[in-house]
Image (tube, rainbow, N blue to C red):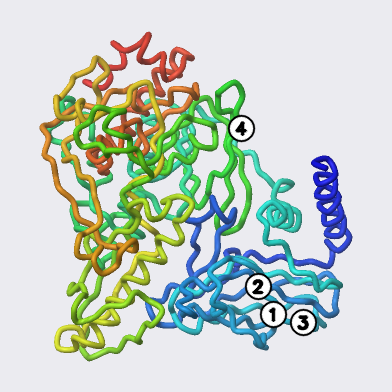
Amino acid sequence: MIKLIFSRHLLSFVVFFCMQRLVAQEQILIEAESFKQKGGWVIDQQSFPVLHSSYLMAHGMGRPVADAKTTVKFPKKGTYRVWVRTKDWAPFPVGPGRFKLFVDGKPLQVTFGESGDSAWKWYNGGDIKVDRDSVELVLQDLTGFNGRVDAILFNKGSEAEPPNELAALDMLRNRLLGLAAGRKEMGNFDLVVVGGGVAGTCAALSAARLGLKVALIQDRPLLGGNNSSEVRVHLMGDLDKSYYPKLGRIVRELDNGDPGNGNPNAKEYGDARKFAIVKAEKNLSLFINTHVYQAETENNTIKAVIGRNIETNQETRFTGAYFADCTGDGTLGFLAGADFRMGRESRKETGESLAADEADDFTLGTSNLWASIPVDSATTFPETPWALPFSDEYHIDEVQSDWQWETGFGNFNTITEAEQIRDHNLRAVYGNWSYLKNHKPEKYAKRELAWVAYIGGKRESRRLMGDHILTQMDIQEGKMYPDATVTATWTIDLHFPDKKNSLYFPDEEFFAGTKHIRVAPYTIPYRSLYSRNINNLFMAGRNISTTHVAFGSTRVMRTCGMMGEVVGMAASIAKKYQSSPRSVYEKYLSEFMRMIKD
């Protein structure tokens, strides 16, 4: 019976594949993120690990954005069925993300994004007649409230719904876009750094300045991660209390001062400064907008990584001697099979007084910051019945957010449910702002939203395990190991749902509290900065080898940047002796520590 069931599934798959091959010349797939003119729509790649694709989103903060436009060539004239892959992101019961698709100036009869279904799937847009070689497509946003579209498919000769199952959808996408066939080899590098946040940028600069040929791969158009103008989190952690005073000098170069969290002025976060510093390095090649989604390994060693451009879908392959995971999510380590941990350990397991009674999936959350500004005259903001409900009894009377606007806490998985977390944050921001505008006009009538982050600022996800796992005791006792490197100063800062927020939004919290447990400056061992089971993998940033409790202190960005500097130095030693990251500790520690001190 098992063999029969398997055979039937295999036969169905083969039949589907063959049918798709027969009509391939009559199918045209347009990835929305590849539209030539984006208008006011933005590219969102945060859910690539789940969707295997980026998408376009109309992030207008309540005002319809400018149209997105592109031209599509058709190999044959005739009648085509139009399919649009989208979702209703806030179906309570029907969400606000409505949009229209125009084909050669004519709108399809269907209005998309208001189905009441939160799942990504294909929607039938009806049939169109194509009598020209090429047609113009226009995406028209109707609300400014984050309508989104993944792809558009034109199908001639078949009315069958395109596949929603991920493996079949991947096959369709790969075939119609020619992804594998068009893959480019980008060359061989001494060090491939995946993740262009503060940690990854510092790692790449450090290694390049020591003579290594470095690739820095970032999945967004900007460097800096949470410190970029897309997320707008300020840098924390002291540099002037380091046991090694010269460690942190690259962080200082990138540091644009302290504009606070969620500053409405994007320039305060120094995007141009970061780009200029990176581009000045002759040994460093920068690849932005490239999401690494595959690792090629052999004998627990990474040989290459494969990325896809989040806008063009061009695939690229990078080979290297050493790799550094600076993604925050531990993405490269996960793809390569590195040991990792996610969530809280138990007190019994670690011996930490601050650990949970029992191990669980609880993680610190993700923030989408926002800010309003004063304007000359009164403005309006629509009612938001699809958003979180606020009232005279409970609302947040603020003109700008800070770190407390946070969703996660084990209610959502910060990697596989990143889109849901961001959307929950948006429902909180828009719902609260709608209440303030419509019920507190004396304070808010002459204010309007200047900026709302659509890229989530994550705190915690995977932690990659190294030869040393940093603990609460290491921090509070100030243990000085022989491989002590980065000096950290931040408190043990573990967030939890705000009690009042929990009262009004049980299991749907979006506001955090914390208790800062102060510590004296302490050091992080180098052994926490490389994988214990992947032979050529370093890590720097919030994904290093710590317990959940210790992570509460190591995760701030100036500290993470110093980790990157250390990884660049270690990579230079490893290359010099053609050895592994572990060998730097076991065989060349004296030389390595002299480099850090000097």
Q: Earlier in the sequence, mark 2 or mark 4?
A: 2
Assess disc 3: are there few (<14), some (14-19) or many (≥20) residues with their C-alpha within 10 Å of its C-alpha: some
Q: Amino acid at mark 1?
A: Gly
Q: Which residue bears the numbered disc 2?
A: 84
Structural distance between the alpha carbons of marks 2 and 1: 7 Å
Q: Which mark is residue 587?
A: none
Q: Earlier in the sequence, mark 2 or mark 1?
A: 2
Assess disc 2: are there few (<14), some (14-19) or many (≥20) residues with their C-alpha within 10 Å of its C-alpha: many
Q: Which residue bears the numbered disc 3?
A: 127
Assess disc 4: are there few (<14), some (14-19) or many (≥20) residues with their C-alpha within 10 Å of its C-alpha: some
**Label 3 element class:** strand
* Quadrant in which residue 335 is drawn: top right
Whether residue 271 is situated above or below residue 392 in the rendered picture: above
Q: Which residue bears the numbered disc 4?
A: 296
Q: Are marks 2 and 1 in contact (CB under 8 Å)?
A: yes
Give residue 462's position: percent from left, percent from top: 41, 40
Give residue 330's position: percent from left, percent from top: 44, 39
Structural distance between the alpha carbons of marks 1 and 3: 7 Å
**Label 4 element class:** strand
Name the residue nearer the viewer: 17 or 328.
17
Structural distance between the alpha carbons of marks 4 and 3: 43 Å
Q: In the rendered view of the protein, which quadrant contains the N terminus?
A: top right
Q: Earlier in the sequence, mark 3 or mark 2?
A: 2
Structural distance between the alpha carbons of marks 2 and 4: 33 Å
State the residue at coordinates (23%, 91%).
378
Q: Are marks 2 and 4 in contact (CB under 8 Å)?
A: no
Whether residue 461 is situated above or below residue 154 in the rendered picture: above
* Quadrant in which residue 177 is drawn: bottom right
